[in-house]
Image (tube, coloured by chain):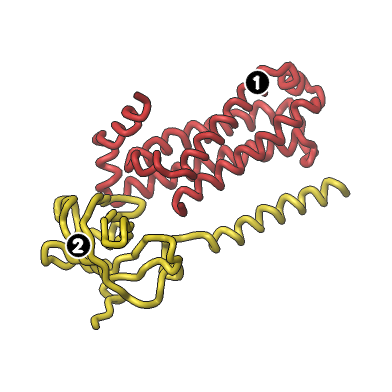
Chain colours: A red, B yellow
Amino acid sequence: MLTALLLGLGDTALAAALRQSGIVYPLTGSAHILGLGLLAGSIVTLDLRILRIIKRGALSELAPLLSRVAACGLLLAMITGVLLFSVQPAHYLGNGAFLLKLLLISLALINVFVVHCLPHWRAILAGQPAAPLLKLTAGISLLLWLTTIVAGRWIAFV
Amino acid sequence: MRTKSTTITIISVLAGILLWLPEVAAHHGWNWTEDKQTEMTGTITEIFIGPPHPRLMIETDAGPWQVDLGNPRQTRNAGFVEGEAKTGDKVLIRGHRSANKDEHIIKAVRATINNKQYTFYPDLLRED
């Protein structure tokens, strides 16, 4: 069912345009990289601040700002990612690095959900220092998003 | 002090990954292929014309092989566009095989299908 839906993406007019045009695909790829840049740049900064490897700046100011920039970057990366995927869905669904990347993104999103449910997140927004549990989630976040980038780059090399 | 060494460790690990990547990498360029140009015949089982990289899947006497064509622009300039070939067509590939014997990929310099030649890399074509 889900597989049929994903494979069907390849039959859309948009997918055909991406395959045929000489400029749409590179532009979509560029926007995808911009999305990654915004996501990784802000989330790495935020995670390092929570871990106190970066000490500058108030978390109560940085956390809402950086998490929103990260969310915007993620949204851009996901929209453009679906477009890039639609060019050859069956090929990517058979690509181990791509499937690993989806798994890593799923885990990272679960981590995001957990963080936003934690009282410790509201605590740092209220100006309190980061609790050990929040530091753990920051470490997990760093690991998952960075490995997502590596898995994504690996798609071209399997 | 501890913070500085942690930062240095993180940067070193990332730099290490970056340095290591080109080793496993890249079906771009030719440094992953054999130097010698060889020919191979097969039957087309799959055609993909589009970004990031056009390719054929072919069935040969030695099993299935992947044929990397030129990049999308080079492939179009070679005249190989949608409709030029279909699955089941016989193809003669002239190109460079992967230097890794376990990797059944050939990078095509030229493909011949239905007596028509598509030369993706005119400058690299070596005639016997």
Res A116 label: 1
Farthest residue to the left: give it. Answer: B115
Secondary structure under badge 1? helix
| Disc 1 residue type (three-letter) | His
Q: Chain of mark 2?
A: B
Residue pictured at 31% horizontal, 56% vertical: B64
Check if mark 2 and mark 1 are on a common chain.
Answer: no
Residue pictured at 30% horizontal, 74% vertical: B38
Res B91 label: 2
In the picture, residue A147 is in which quadrant?
A: top right
Q: Position of residue A138 (x, y in %)?
A: 71, 33
Compared to B34, does A123 lie above or below? above
Compared to A101, does A75 lie above or below? above
**Is B44 placed left or right of A145 in the picture?**
left
Task: Check disc 2: other Cα within 10 Å, few if <14, some if 14-19, many if 20+.
Answer: many
Farthest residue to the right: give it. Answer: B1
Residue pictured at 30% horizontal, 61% vertical: B69
- For marks 2 and 1, give the CA distance: 56 Å
Quarter holding the N terminus of chain A is: top left
| Disc 2 residue type (three-letter) | Val
Q: Position of residue A118 (x, y in %)?
A: 70, 18
Farthest residue to the bottom: give it. Answer: B128
Q: Position of residue A34 (x, y in %)?
A: 50, 43
**Is A48 placed left or right of B101 in the picture?**
right
Q: Position of residue A126 (x, y in %)?
A: 76, 19
**Is B54 placed left or right of B35 in the picture?**
left
Compared to A72, does B100 lie above or below? below
Task: Check disc 1: other Cα within 10 Å, few if <14, some if 14-19, many if 20+.
Answer: few
